[in-house]
Amino acid sequence: MKLRSRSGIALLSLAVVSLFETSAYAAKGIFNANVSPSEALIATSTLMTITAEIAADVVNPLIVSSVVVYETTASGTPIAQLGRLYDDGTHGDAVAHDTIYTMQLVVNEPAPRTRYIRISAAYSGIRNRYLSPVIRTDVFAPLPANLVDAASATVQSIESSFFLNVNALGVDGARQQALTSALGNPNIGPNRVNLSGPNLSLVYHYTDPNTGFSFDIRGIAILSDPANPTDGPGRSTPAHPIPNSKSPGNDKVLIFGPGYHTADPQNAIVDHAASQFADTEFMTFSPAPPSITGGAAADLEVVKTWGEYGTVIIHTHGGLWDLNGTQEVVLVSGTSASLWNRLTYAFDLLADRIGVAGDGRFVFYPSFVTKYVSGMKDTFLYLGACESLQNDTLWNALSAKGAKVAFGWSETRRSGIQWDHVCGADRSNATPRQLFRSPFSAAGVRCCTEQNGPTWGPQCDANNANGFRRLE
């Protein structure tokens, strides 16, 4: 199991290039640059509104006519100027003279296209210009009818066939058979599937014969050993408190269990979490007693609200989507891949922020968190899902939103793991260890903290690839 902790130290750097200055100092600079909407469909006129807060300055006044937007490369190199932004109540500007500059751009593309833009401004007496971050916009072709149905059915078929084959072929043999089945599918094939542990990551590819436009739907089949079910019951809180503990930003708690209300071992964990937060010693949580957001109610829309909570307890199935050099943590949501939901989340499917799982529900990727979750309030997250912190992709998205701490798992979690044994002497994979990187350890060194009665002491281990981790 792992834990991630966000540092509170910010570094200010000033980078000067021949034309642009990208860092703001004092009051000068471009802040909160945004394009809304940032995604559109082909052959459809879409009004995109570009806004940014441009700080005023008394000593070096802003040159109002210099506030412009450029089309750029992905790295930010200017290609062409698209127009000027205004703060006078015109050109879509909501309020005149409030330092929020606005420009509107009508987009109507005949084919799919990605465009990058950047806002630039100059101040009197300052040689170099200020730049916003590069903002990506996309124009997609609409999803063909039944494409998501076909992708979802394919992943479900692969996963269900795996469980049917386990008795005859064994777990490893059934996984290999699932891989063979995916390789033989004309919409998947050799370069669009990878088996890594229990995770079969794939891309379902389709080319429209009428338009020539290509579409890719991500999918993952989690091929867990039925004899060792993942996410089994266990303690939700440590038996002994850890020194130097931190506190969440508010007392609101969300217990998020997409698998709840079904025949799933997650139910015991979710129920236990609710009982623990109903009877706490040092904090009073809201609501009291805590409610469980489970099953279909634990949907993608609830994920968007994670930032409102000081504590988020998540129990779902997860995995590592691993294909063609891209490795991303995925979590299963309670949102089904129904017709209505496919229409609702069409842009997210097209932009690879969500994909399909082997149980007919949508999985979501870290980019979904980046796109939709509002700023977190020093949120604590327990990521009760296999491989939720296998790498830093999910943590980086949460940390950027303001998460303070995240607990998660670096591997496929087996049933029977209990918090009492998190830091025991047993070094086997069945007993996760608490690992952390401290200011006193060399870069990249992971040290195991063993619990000996009421005390905790550092003890390093060369074979600590798995376990419960805290990186600072």
Image (tube, rainbow, N blue to C red):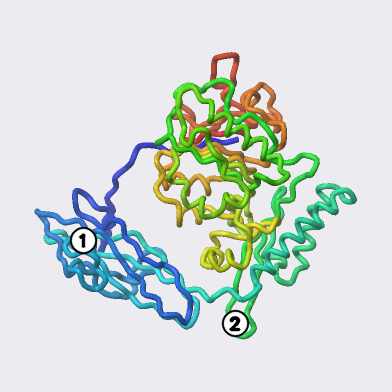
3 up-or-down from 453: above or below: below
- Circle 2 sits on which residue? 212
Mark 1 and mark 2: Cα distance apart in space: 45 Å
Residue type at numbered disc 1: Asn
Q: Residue at x 53, y 76 (%)?
A: 141
Query: Which of the two marks, 1 or 2, is nearer to us in this view?
Result: 2
Mark 2 residue element: loop
Location of residue 219 (image quadrant): bottom right
Location of residue 411 (image quadrant): top right
Q: Residue at x 42, y 47 (%)?
A: 400
- Residue at the far bottom in the pictured view: 210
Q: Nearer the viewer, residue 403 or 275?
A: 275
Q: Nearer the viewer, residue 146 or 176?
A: 146
- Circle 1 sits on which residue? 128
Q: Relative to 361, is 350 on the left or the right?
A: left
Q: Residue at x 70, y 46 (%)?
A: 262
Pinpoint residue 53: horizontal percent, then vertical percent. 25, 58
Q: Relative to 109, is 71 on the left or the right?
A: left
- Residue at the far left in the pictured view: 59
Mark 1 residue element: loop
Between discs 1 and 2, the one toward the N terminus: 1
Location of residue 1 (image quadrant): top right
Pinpoint residue 44: horizontal percent, then vertical percent. 45, 80
Pinpoint residue 86: horizontal percent, then vertical percent. 21, 69
